[in-house]
Amino acid sequence: MRPVRTADLRQWGMRWSVVVVAVLALVAGCGRAATVSEWRELPLPAQGARVVELVPVRDGVLALGSVPSGIDRAPAAWTSADGSHWHALTVEPHSPYGFLAELISAGVGDRTVVLGRAFGGAHGNPRMTVWSGDSAKLVEYPQIFELFGGPHAIAVTAAASLGATDLLIGGWDGVAGRYGAAIWISVDGANWPRRVDDPALSSGPGELTGASAITTGPPGFVVVGETQRDGTQLPLKWISPDGVTWQRTPLPGTAALATQVGCNPTRCTIFGQSTAASPTVLCWPTDTAAALPGPAATTIDTVKVVVEDTRTLAVVRLDGAVHLLSVSPNCTDWQDLALPVPAARAQFAELPTGLLLSTIEDNGSRLWLRA
């Protein structure tokens, strides 16, 4: 028998290395494929539909967005119990921008209140529209231009509803000439007086407040945002049991923004980001606990937070790419869940049958269910 030479051992070692690497790659690839294959594509509620918001309702989910209409798009909304079978709501616009609006945010209480957005005018700025109705029909209630726009406007960003009270949040140039957080409140879905002088919300001397997101939870209405003092951004949370009386709570930390909040019947979780040279995603498990860091990126945009019993899920755009993040209730054990396809924009909501995801493109969406 020929003696084994050192060169033979090296050759066998190289061959086994190639085999081992190939097997590991196959295993890793199968694991990734198995994770991705947990997503099942669902039919759209209408041809060319763009679903840009998904809102839980008692019997399933309310989907908001738009459908093609000639060379433009028209507002549209649907409900579904399972993500596969859709019922179209009657959508009744009454203003020129209402016919061109895309529905972007909603709150569901005694009524369904919806915020819509179209672009137009001399500068192509967003033109906000408000809608009210129920699970069968949404009616636009036109407002005077300077209620949401004009020289003192900053933004109107999101809607919420609790009982018979509807709220919109945004920013406004207040009576003292300082930009700050503002709310619009309605008890009938049609009339929306603006409140910009509440000392808990508006900017005090030496600061600029901003409201980023709103939801409802155990305290009532929950708004998150920030204040800027001496060039430093500080995260804030506001709560109100009725939309009228507000309490401001500073969140632990400096050089940070609170950008989204999600609540279940027992707790709320806040997401945001640091504003340091290398930003990271932040998660506050409570008002008093320090934020815990997640992934880092040059640009961060937290789109939505959903609080489950055992996990908190968030859609976050990191450097322009969507990630579906999962953390434990105490904001540890960060996981980046595989998406069915790469996406630059996405929305999601829970259904009894699983997690419903909309990946959003310029000309439409794709819907997916993860059981």
Image (cartoon, helix red, strand yellow):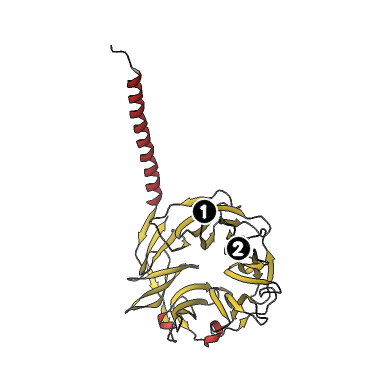
Q: Give the CA distance from mark 2 to mark 1.
A: 20 Å
Nearest the eye: 157 or 166: 157
Extreme-left residue of the structure? 1
- The numbered disc on residue 257 is 2
Q: Is residue 78 above or below residue 290?
A: below
Residue at the image position 33 percent from the left and 25 percent from the top? 11
At label 1, the amino acid type is Ser
Which one is closest to the eye, mark 2 or mark 1?
2
Q: Is the residue marked by circle 2 packed among few (<14), some (14-19), or many (20+) residues within 10 Å?
A: many
- The numbered disc on residue 326 is 1
* Secondary structure category for the residue under label 2: strand
Task: Locate residue 18 relative to residue 320 in the image: left or right.
Answer: left
Q: Is residue 185 above or below residue 84?
A: below
Image position, residue 149 (x, y; %): 53, 82
- The numbered disc on residue 174 is none
Residue at the image position 46 percent from the left and 77 percent from the top? 117
At label 2, the amino acid type is Leu
Q: Is residue 197 above or below residue 223?
A: below
Extreme-bottom residue of the structure? 144
Task: Locate residue 326 relative to residue 285 in the image: left or right.
Answer: left
Considering only order in the chain, which callout, 1 or 2, is on the residue closer to the N terminus? 2
Question: In what quadrant of the picture does the C terminus appear?
Answer: bottom left
